[in-house]
Amino acid sequence: MGDENNVKKKQDQRNPKRLPNKKYAIKKRLPLRPIEGDNVIFVTKKTNFKAQLEKCCDLLSKGEKEIILHGLGAAIQRCCNLALQLELLFSGTCQIEVNTGTVDIIDDLEPLTDDVDFGTQVRHSSSIHIRVFRNAMLGANK
């Protein structure tokens, strides 16, 4: 009898908007981009890794002093791999600086029936920001 009450309390404590609901369709918004620029690269799971690596190499080879890589959720591993590949390719001339955090992502709840209103829900996603910067130029005399 006591176990049944505990189960009911746990079910009541859940956020009803986070549960699969037949009254709403969830439309995921794009996350906010922290900064824009030529040296800022947003790493995703869908973009070709080799193309991202070549873009970063071109930026660093053409004299860019630093590039900033951003990754969210499942793209964090790819973002780390990209930074480590850059560090290997520009060995001795590049360093990396890593910051992690959490980003709030907003989803829209669109009603499927007329008896409910529009709504939003907030979810949290892990994020990584990697700064790849040059500490020495190739071919420069020390």
Image: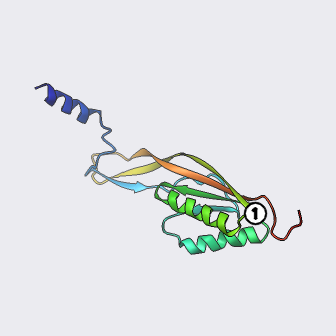
**Position in image of residue 83 (x %, y %):** 62, 61
x and y percentages locating residue 92 in the rendered image: 74, 63
For the C terminus, the quadrant is bottom right
Pointer 1 local density, CA inside 10 Å: few below 14, some 14–19, many at least 20 = some
Q: Quadrant of the N terminus?
A: top left
* Side (left or right) of 136 relative to 82: right
Q: Please tell me which residue is depicted at 79% across the width and 68% down the height of the picture.
A: 63
Q: How many marks?
A: 1
The type of residue carrying mark 1 is: Thr
Q: Quadrant of residue 91?
A: bottom right
The residue sitting at 59% across, 57% down in the picture is: 70
Quadrant in the picture for residue 39? bottom right
- Residue at 50% x, 49% y is 126
Q: Position of residue 87 (x, y in %)?
A: 66, 63
Residue situated furthest right in the rendering: 141
Q: Please say if 68 is above or below 10.
A: below
Residue at the image position 89 percent from the left and 66 percent from the top? 141
In this rendering, position of residue 95 left or right of residue 118: right
Asked whether 112 or 67 is in front, the reply is: 67
Element carrying mark 1: loop
Residue at the extreme top of the image, as rendered: 2
Color theme of the render: rainbow
Residue 43 falls left or right of residue 133: left
- Residue 94 in percent (x, y) is at 72, 61
- The residue furthest left is 1
Q: Which residue is mark 1?
A: 93
Vertical relation: 8 (above or below) 136: above
Q: Is residue 108 above or below residue 59?
A: above
Instruction: Tell me if 118 is positioned left or right of 74 in this view.
Output: left
Decide which of 113, 56 is in the foreground and name it: 56
